[in-house]
Every structure is written in structure tokens, then in C-alpha cells.
Amino acid sequence: MTAFDFDATVVGAGAVGLACGRALAKRGLTVLVLEKEGHIGQGVSSRNSEVIHGGLYYPTGSLKARFCVEGRRALYAFLDSHKIDYRRCGKLVVATEEAEVERIEAIFQQATANGVEGLKHLTGAQARALEPGLNAHAAILSPESGLFASHDYMLALQGEIEDAGGSVVISTPFERAEPLPGGGFTITAGGEGGTTLTTRLLVTAPGLSAQAVAARIEGYPAADIPAGHFGKGVYFRLTGKAPFERLIYPPPIPGALGTHYRKDLGGQAVFGPDLVYVETEDYSVDPAKAEEFAGYIRRFWPGLPDGALTPDYAGIRPKLHGKGEPQPDFQLHGSEHHGIEGLMALFGIESPGLTGSLAIGEAVADRLTDG
């Protein structure tokens, strides 16, 4: 029997890659996590809303619905046990006019089917009683939604991997992998003067690089690599006092949840993201967009002062659908897809991937270690 350097290697030290590493380490495997950047969580995981999603929107039975609800429940317990900062502030999904009531009612039905706890219908008056200043014709309250310190969470995942004897190695880009005749892989990583190692199991969870990484695994069928798209979203910060305590979401836009409001853990109001498809990783924020944002925000917060929005940051989501195309589910490709034993390749892990990360990690570990 071959002696491997590691039982399992994970490509990508974002929230999902680290959660996969943790789940494999919990099963007694020796784990290596490779990260090309100089710190963990520098990609998709560092440029999002840090929202803990309830699981309202996703088609029942989809991986997104399942991982969001299971992952959220596990995440609150994990944050408690590691004393990581979070706020279970709740979320209002708001119909700002009569025409939107049917859309939020459909979300209520979807969320109920997905097993989301504690949902309530609110009249406009009830919503305004909770959040004075809100323009609401009607609303849904999701009390399980919240916010958390996502980087502290990723540090805790890294800590658990290392406590179990695993390693998280930064500034070490994945170069290529070759399946070995009797199972397992030889991996080359680290660029110039890099290293070669062997591993029994391989998980690829590199976010925006998912397609490029899969293409560097020898024998990976090109037809099994789904087309990827970059969905950019920018955020604006409010100068002045945060107007609402809860998350405020209008009905979703095609392909995303739309520009929403949050009061971050530091007490400041942030709005975003929008969705624009881009060709390259460009994280600039155009200040001229403030006007477009202001028009959108005033639909649910008419009291937004003029000139109060300042550019904050941008994120890019690894989308599997282009503009105008239906939004697909997460894709976890095991050997039934690509024919390579011991390999799990993850594609399109955008929202609610952060919320669902612990559940994704457990599902990946279960599939790779079954029997």
C-alpha cells in the first residue's frame, strides 16, 4: 500500500476550503490546505457582506437550500463555542409597494418549504414599528438571519485543522495534479522552486479559480468543467448614524439577492452589492455609482440624506450563469462526474457559501470518506 505524504489536500483557504479541511481532519485524516495568497481568506471570503443567511430563497431540495439551513445552524453553534463575534439581528424582506407583495409572499412559501424557522408576515405598520424610517407596504421577518466576524471564523477553522495535526500553507499556489495508478495524486505546488507531494484525497475549493484549477488536473475531462463568470458587486458605506438595526432586503434581482442594507459589527451602515458581469478581477469602486445606489436605497429608506454614500469595497462572485441565464445550484463534482477517484471539485460556490460552509465541508468529507 502506498504511503502518502497527506491523507487529504485542499486547494483554497477560504471559508469553504478551510471548512472542508476541518471536516476531513475531524475524521482523523492528515490534512494539507494550500493557499496561493499571503493570508487565508483573501478571495471571495474576504469581500462579501458577512451575512448569516436564513435560507429563504433557494429552490427546495437544492444544495444551496440544504447547506444554507444546515450550515447556519452549525455556524451559530461554532461561533458560540469559539467565542466569535456575531449578531443575530434578523432580516426584513420588504415589499416597498403593492406590486412587490406577491414576490415576498413567494419567498415566504419557499422559505417555509426549506425549513427556515420563526418566519413572520408583517404589515407595513408592523415593519415600521420595528424599524422607523422604513418604507414598507408589507414585510417578512426572518429572525435567524445575522452577521458575523468572518475572518475570525476562518482563523478558528485554521486553528482546528492545525490542532488536529494538519497544515495550512500560504503563498503556495497549486500548479498541477496527476492521478497515481493505484489511487491518490501527485501534486506540484508553490511556483518557482516549488514542492511535489502525494495525497490520497484531493478537494479543489479555490473560488474564482475553480475552473483553472480543475483544468490543471491531468485527465480531468474538459466537458465536466462548467463555464465560469465573474459577477462583481460594489458596496457603499453611509456617513452618519446607521438607520436600522436589522438587515433590510428588497425582493431579489435576477441572478442575485440585490442591494441590501446591513449595520456591520462596528455599527456602521453598508449598502450592497449590485451585480455587474466583468471579464477580469477588478476591485475598484466607481464613486459615480453612488447616485444609482441612492435611487435604489430610497425605495426602502426615503430618508437617505443627499451625498451620504462613500465608496467602500467590491467583491467578485464565482458565477456559473451569465447575464439573463437562470441561477444554477452549487456544483460538487465527485468521481461520478469526472471519473477520477478521490477527487472532489467545487464550482460556483458563491452566496450562501459562507453561511453554508460547515455543511459543505461535512458533505465533501462524507462523500470522500464513505466506507
Image: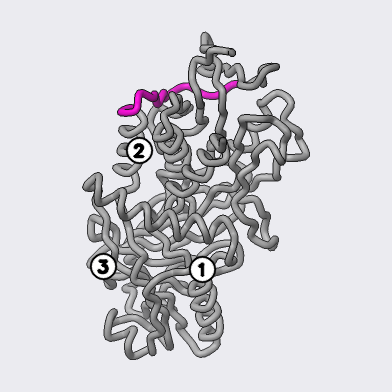
The residues tagged by marks 2 and 1 sit, at their Cα atoms, a distance apart of 27 Å
**Residue plotted at (55% across, 48% down):** 349
Residue 78, above or below 259: above
Kindly identify the residue that appears in the image at 45 percent across and 47 percent down: 357
Relative height, residue 20 to residue 71 (above, below): above
Q: Amino acid at mark 1?
A: Asn
Of the 4 image quadrants, the one containing the C terminus is: top right
Amino acid identity at mark 3: Ala
Helix, strand or loop at label 3? It is loop
- State which tag comes first along the sequence, 1 or 3: 1
Q: Residue furthest top?
A: 193
Quarter holding residue 340:
top right
Going by the numbered disc 2, the residue's amino acid type is Leu
Q: Quadrant of the N terminus?
A: top right
Tell me where residue 78 appears, x and y as whole percent: 31, 48
What range is drawn magenta here?
162-176
